[in-house]
Image (tube, rainbow, N blue to C red):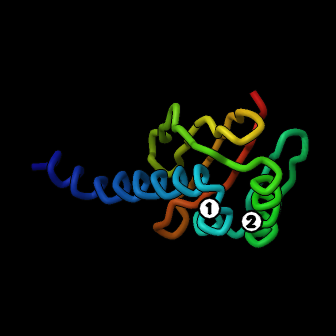
Amino acid sequence: MKQLLLFLMVAPTFMAVNTNLAGISKALGDGDATALGNYFDDSVEVAILEQEDFYNKTQAVEKVRAFFQSHQPRSFNQIHKGSSQSSDSQYCIGDLVTADAKYRVYIYMKNVDGKTLIQELRFNKE
């Protein structure tokens, strides 16, 4: 009985994370910075190649949009994902194939007020 109650309490969190990761993956593969921005927290650390800084949500969307315009995404494939023991944070690592190169993408997400939001997004050229 205790296991069932624990599952019922934790299951919605895992379902929300998977839904968010599906939406995030689609936005990355489509090169849709606006859709990706729906998953950003109010402040996001964005690292694109050698340029790294903290941005508010609007600025972060613009930085990612500029990257997508310069490097047109073709596909995104999740390689690895996981969560902390307490399940209050998750990560995803994947490959973004663009018109000109392949990039390794690192995404760090944290649960904020019941939502899983991106805290950090990194694009590194492979």
Looking at the image, residue 21 lies above or below residue 97:
below
- Which residue shows up at 48% across the image and 41% down it? 83
Camera-side residue: 47 or 65?
65
The reply to whether discs 2 and 1 touch (Cβ–Cβ < 8 Å) is yes
Looking at the image, residue 26 lies above or below residue 122:
below
State the SS at label 2. Answer: helix
Q: Residues within 10 Å of mark 2 (few under 14, many from 20)?
A: many
Residue 35 figure quarter: bottom right
Camera-side residue: 49 or 29?
29
Residue 15 figure quarter: bottom left
- Residue at the spot of label 1: 36
Camera-side residue: 38 or 95?
95
Comes first in the chain, label 2 or label 1: 1
Q: Quadrant of the C terminus?
A: top right
Across and down, in percent, residue 2 comes to 15, 48
Q: Judge left or right: residue 43 versus residue 41.
A: right
**Residue lying farthest to the top in this orientation:** 126
State the SS at label 1. Answer: helix
Across and down, in percent, residue 40 comes to 64, 64
Q: Judge left or right: residue 83 versus residue 65.
A: left
| Type of amino acid at the residue the image marks with label 1 | Leu
Across and down, in percent, residue 100 comes to 77, 37
- Which residue shows up at 68% across the image and 63% down it? 33
Label 2, label 1: how many angstroms apart (C-alpha)? 8 Å
Residue 117 figure quarter: bottom right
The disc label shown at residue 46, or none: none
- Which residue shows up at 39% across the image and 59% down it? 16
Q: Residues within 10 Å of mark 1 (few under 14, many from 20)?
A: many
**Residue lying farthest to the right in this orientation:** 51
Looking at the image, residue 100 lies above or below residue 46:
above
| Type of amino acid at the residue the image marks with label 2 | Val
- Residue at the spot of label 2: 61
